[in-house]
């Protein structure tokens, strides 16, 4: 429960629908700490990862990269989390189970996930 509070109170909630799978249209929903929401519909190729989807959205963002873990979101629309008080979380909708799941590593998974 503590993590959920941190996500909503300090950082941003990022939701990617279409699960990086066989979809041409992806919904990107960003809930900002100030209560506003940014929504985009991204037309993309099958198998496009979350990092590339976010880049196509045109939403101002900063990223870092780890060779083994992939891209990590540092800030979006002027909001950033710190290691001590919050972090970003990516949720991916799993059509097979009908549930939202957190992305286990970064937005694109890096070489250890893909």
Image: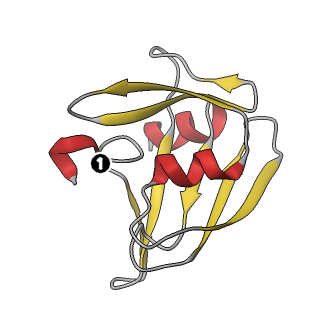
Horizontal and vertical percent position of residue 91? 47, 57
Horizontal and vertical percent position of residue 99? 42, 75
Q: Nearer the viewer, residue 90 or 110?
A: 110
Horizontal and vertical percent position of residue 1? 44, 44
Residue in the image at 44% along x and 62% along y: 48
- Residue 25: name its quadrant: bottom right
Helix, strand or loop at label 1? It is loop
Residue in the image at 49% along x and 79% along y: 23
Screen quadrant of the C terminus: bottom left
- Residue 60: name its quadrant: top right
Give the residue at the far left of this rendering. 112
Residue 114 drawn above or below residue 47 = above
Q: Nearer the viewer, residue 4 or 98?
A: 98
State the count of labels: 1
Using residue 26 as the reference point, say whether residue 29 is left or right of it. right
Residue in the image at 65% along x and 34% along y: 9
Provide the residue designation for mark 1. Answer: 104
Residue 84 drawn above or below residue 22 = above
Using residue 70 as the reference point, say whether residue 7 is left or right of it. right
Using residue 38 as the reference point, say whether residue 113 is left or right of it. left
Residue in the image at 51% along x and 36% along y: 88
Q: Nearer the viewer, residue 81 or 64?
A: 64
Residue count near mark 1 (Cα–Cα under 10 Å), binned few <14, some 14–19, many ≥20:
few
Indicate the colouring scheme: secondary structure
Residue 67 drawn above or below residue 48 = above
Q: Nearer the viewer, residue 84 or 38?
A: 38
């Amino acid at each position: 429960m503590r993590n959920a509070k941190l996500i909503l109170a300090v950082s941003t909630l990022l939701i990617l629908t279409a699960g990086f799978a066989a979809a041409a249209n992806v919904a990107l929903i960003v809930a900002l700490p100030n209560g506003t929401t940014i929504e985009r519909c991204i037309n993309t190729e099958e198998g496009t990862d979350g990092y590339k989807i976010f880049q196509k959205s045109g939403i101002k963002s900063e990223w870092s990269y780890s060779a083994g873990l992939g891209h990590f979101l540092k800030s979006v629309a002027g909001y950033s989390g710190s290691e001590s008080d919050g972090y970003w979380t990516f949720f991916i909708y799993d059509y097979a189970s009908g549930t939202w799941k957190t992305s286990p590593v970064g937005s694109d998974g890096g070489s250890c996930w893909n």
